[in-house]
Amino acid sequence: MFWNLSSSYSEARGFRVNARRIMSRQHHPVDDLVVSSNFIRAVRESGYLSLSTALAELVDNSLQAEATNIAISIGWSTDALPEIVVEDNGVGMSKDELETCLRFGGSSRFDARQSFGRFGMGLPAASLSQARRVEVTTWRDGAAEQWVALDVDAIAAGSSPNLTARRGSSTSISTSGCRVRWMQCDRIEYRRLAWLERSLHRALGRIYRRFLTSGIAMTINGSQVEPVDPMLLSTKVERATARLEFQPLEIELETSTGETSAVTVRFAMLPVNRWHGLDNATKRRIGIVGQGGVSILRAGREIASGWHLMGAKRKENYDDWWRCEIEFEPVLDEHFGITINKQGVRPSAALREAVEPELESIARLLNARVRQAFEEVKFQTAAETSCRIAAAADRDLPVITSGRRGGALTYRIGSEPMPVESMFRSTLTQRMLDLTLNVDHPAFAALYRPLQSIESEAAMELRTSLELFLLSFARSAAQMEKSGQHFDDLLRIWSSNYGRMLRKS
């Protein structure tokens, strides 16, 4: 019996080809699951809200690769679509990692909970949401670059994706790193480069504020990205900054592995008395107007902002004047409902039950404090006229000496809760007579509050007359005290009698 050698060779060759195809499908079963030409176009609609949120996926990868310097370059010409390059000095990628990085789900850290990435979707999905072609180049140990590319138009036309690493033509300045190049960026809505740069500075500065503060360098077309703190704790205007309210809350939640991890919540209050008079442009620039609410950070990186986990408390204009920051680690992703593009949160029932009651209570308390602060500002503004008149008249009154100092006094009127027996309290310190009205005394509700709520000219004149009456009374008391006469008993008895009469009226 004789074998047909030519037939056997053809069959064997066909077997090897089919075997390679089978092995290829087993190793990368992409075409078994999706239609590439349709999928590549559909993935462009993956839901990234803006260019900054898409770029954040690339910055996440750089930070996970231990980069300390991230440079974003935007090329913009009138006759071509924009091109964006993100380059870092991280650890770079191996050949296998490079050939996997543009595959959807092709992550060496799939479902890892140590840092930003988790699903292996960020780089390809974010890139194609903004650009029609993406190239990824990497290098290590000073060796020549290697690169891979993904082209929307080529794949949509029927070409098979070719993600085999190819040798680059140059070496890079840093020992290792990575460069992602977005070409034909057809989803950018800004018409001017300067507007785009300004928007990216603001957005990325806020998203990565913790990392920028800790020393990570990020530039956009050579300009340093500065941290943007929505809590305004480091924003100094009119010699004032926001301040932390309360001690940070630590709320323990159970993770998917049965362990526990903490959600940390911080609150800040803005200085209403110092910033209320800023013009609207300044308020918008520093982030007072429209920037209130909650900032949520995952592994130190902001993933959501707005009005979250406040229970039944609705947002009001007064809520622009306090801030909340919620921070958690990736092991709690299920509780916060993190999606593949890390935009926004979908809190679980367990998370809501654990944090909303306390956060709602604090939100209402801070709202009340802001309202009170604005009432005090309104009070102070209205009282300035009376204090100015009293100071002008003081030059013609008997001098009250204080130590070696003499001369005219200055005046201030304030208000606060005090024991109900006293209608007001006055102190003389460093030539300033400070008159504090008792908001709990019946006289405040009967006389002062009605006048404060009426904005007519007659009401203002009557209020000024009342304040001058009280200031002159307080000055007379200070004058008697300095001359050795005791006035406290008279003030206490008079306040008590007047209060009783008002209650009967």
Image (spheres, grey):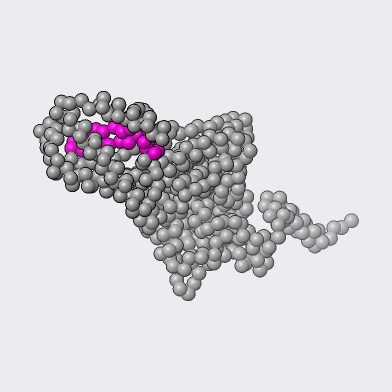
Q: Position of residue 337 (x, y in %)?
A: 61, 43
Q: Nearer the viewer, residue 173 or 19?
A: 173
At 58% from the left and 51% from the top, the residue drawn is 341
Q: Nearer the viewer, residue 452 or 108?
A: 452
Is 470 located above or below residue 230 in the figure?
above
Q: How many labels does the image show?
A: 0
Q: Position of residue 41 (x, y in %)?
A: 64, 63
- Does residue 174 appear in this view? no
Q: Is residue 413 left or right of residue 34?
A: left
Is 96 located above or below residue 8 in the figure?
above
At 62% from the left and 40% from the top, the residue drawn is 348
Q: Where is residue 450 in the image (x, y as percent from the top left)?
A: 39, 44
Q: Locate the C terminus by quadrant.
A: top left
Task: Using the rendered view, name the quadrant where residue 160 is placed.
Answer: bottom right
At 78% from the left and 61% from the top, the residue drawn is 10
Q: Nearer the viewer, residue 11 or 232?
A: 232
- Does residue 410 appear in this view? yes
Q: What stretch is highlighted in magenta?
A: 422-446
